[in-house]
């Protein structure tokens, strides 16, 4: 029997908007919708709780390869038919992350049935044609091979790969040339049927829709899926400190400084976001003012907080001339150490600016139907419920100055000795890391 989950059934730390409803189908597929008035658009996603972090070393790249091949043919549609239908009613596509794979459609309310029918066929009946496998394999190998052509992106992947060297979380989502080349059609089929199960699927939609009607059509599209048990927990990876350098013929040296941080579901994620904004989230941030405005060592410098189900990290990224690399990295270390030691703590004005910017960013992005859908899907996957905009803003507003400085002194100060620096580009004298191992207060 289909179960309708009321607001009161959501976890206590989440509050659902009256427009958000959730239904669990008989087979375990979770359906969550956000009905938005005054629009004609509709954004739909099928989120599968399977990403590159779920792969063994031998399976590296299979989640990404599955996503590519799913659109290449089913029992009733070939690749051309899928492409023509997708183009007819809007935009359809997919992407793979470390924690999940997402298949989506952006369309009008008139074409809800067609979008769900196509996504259901792609997710339930892929045939993984052998000729398409070879073509997609070549495309992915080309994608992997040209990674160093974008050094700013490559150094970020290098930092994760090096810091989480002994974990699937650190491996490139696309895999490597060796693993992609050896994957067979049988590997794909086995991986697909092991991970694409009803209990690991969330169907989310936002826009002009009726929840009961959407649930009925989702049931028609996904009723044949069966559940196979809970998803195994991804173990927290060990963080490897050190320096990794890959010489590349580029005009600038690109660096990425990675520090362990709370995982996605950690209650400290809000204070982490606020701290990250103050550290390197804009042109008034500590890093930008000191490295760009005052020292002129870089053109661009920023930090960002990357959180996953198993772990998280704060990364500081920038680029500079090879002769100034050591000075730039040293200044990044100084900025962090000044914050974590309490020599230059966060002040009230910085906190106000960070929280105000986050409020503006959250509310403006909430006006986008696709963003609303993505939040709906990922919140259901990570938390089993929904936190509306008012709830998110309340948690941001609740972050106090003492909490931010305590986070720096008591948590982040202990992580600095584990930092990993990745550098891509022309490197003269290799930079070194001299981080103090503080115990915090």
Image: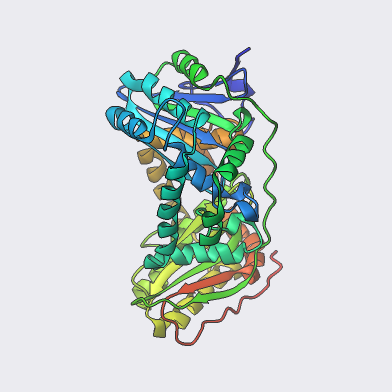
With 125 as the anchor, is 239 left or right in this view?
Answer: right
Q: Position of residue 384 (x, y in %)?
A: 60, 31
258 over 436 or under it: above or below: above
Q: Is 249 situated above or below 270?
A: below
Q: Residue at x 38, y 76 (%)?
A: 320
42 with respect to 389 (left or right):
left
Of residues 50 and 411, the one drawn nearer to the viewer in this rendering:
50
Q: Quadrant of the C terminus?
A: bottom right
> Relative to 254, is 135 above or below?
above
Q: Which residue appears at 62% of the width and 58% of the height?
A: 406
Q: Nearer the viewer, residue 422 or 72?
A: 72
Determine which quarter of the picture holds residue 290: bottom left
- Farthest left residue in view: 88
Task: Check the picture and name the quadrant holding the N terminus.
Answer: top right
- Work out whether residue 236 or residue 68 is closer to the camera in this orientation and state it: 68
- Asked if residue 4 can be seen in this view, the reply is yes
Residue 270: in sight, yes or no?
no
Percent across and percent down for residue 152 are 40, 66
Q: Is residue 233 above or below residue 260?
A: above
Occupied quadrant, residue 189: top right
Q: Percent position (x, y) of residue 415?
A: 64, 65
């Amino acid at each position: 029997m289909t179960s309708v989950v009321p607001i009161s059934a959501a976890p206590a730390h989440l509050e659902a908007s009256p427009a958000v409803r959730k239904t669990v189908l008989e087979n375990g597929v979770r359906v969550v919708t956000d009905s938005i008035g005054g629009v004609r658009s509709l954004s739909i996603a099928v989120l599968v709780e399977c990403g590159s972090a779920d792969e063994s070393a031998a399976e590296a790249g299979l989640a990404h390869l599955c996503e590519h091949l799913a659109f290449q043919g089913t029992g009733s549609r070939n690749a051309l038919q899928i492409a023509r239908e997708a183009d007819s009613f809007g935009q359809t596509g997919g992407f793979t992350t470390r924690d999940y794979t997402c298949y989506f459609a952006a369309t009008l309310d008139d074409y809800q049935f067609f979008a769900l029918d196509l996504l259901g066929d792609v997710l339930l009946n892929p045939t993984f044609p052998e000729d398409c496998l070879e073509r997609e394999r070549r495309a992915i190998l080309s994608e992997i091979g040209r990674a160093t052509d974008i050094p700013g992106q490559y150094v970020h992947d290098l930092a994760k790969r090096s810091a989480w060297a002994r974990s699937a979380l650190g491996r490139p989502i696309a895999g490597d040339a060796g693993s992609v080349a050896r994957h067979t059609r049988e590997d794909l089929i086995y991986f697909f049927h092991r991970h694409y199960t009803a209990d690991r699927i969330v169907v989310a939609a936002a826009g002009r829709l009726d929840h009961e009607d959407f649930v009925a059509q989702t049931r028609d599209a996904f009723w044949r899926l069966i559940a196979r048990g809970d998803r195994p927990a991804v173990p927290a990876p060990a963080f490897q400190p050190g320096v990794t350098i890959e010489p590349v013929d580029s005009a600038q040296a690109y660096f990425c400084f990675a520090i362990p941080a709370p995982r996605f579901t950690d209650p400290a994620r809000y204070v982490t976001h606020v701290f990250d904004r103050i550290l390197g989230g804009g042109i008034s941030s500590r890093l930008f003012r000191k490295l760009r405005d005052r020292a002129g060592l870089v053109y661009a410098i920023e930090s960002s907080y990357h959180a996953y189900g198993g772990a998280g990290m704060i990364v500081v990224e920038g680029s500079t001339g090879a002769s100034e690399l050591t000075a730039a990295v040293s200044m990044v270390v100084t900025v962090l150490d000044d914050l974590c030691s309490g020599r230059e703590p966060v002040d009230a004005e910085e906190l106000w600016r960070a929280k105000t910017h986050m409020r503006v960013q959250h509310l403006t992005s909430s006006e986008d139907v696709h963003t609303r859908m993505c939040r709906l899907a990922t919140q259901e996957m990570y938390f089993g419920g929904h936190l509306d905009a008012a709830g998110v803003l309340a948690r941001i507003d609740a972050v106090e100055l003492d909490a931010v400085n305590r986070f720096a002194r008591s948590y982040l100060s202990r992580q600095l000795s584990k930092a990993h620096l990745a550098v891509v580009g022309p490197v003269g004298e290799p930079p070194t890391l001299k981080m103090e191992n503080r115990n915090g207060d």
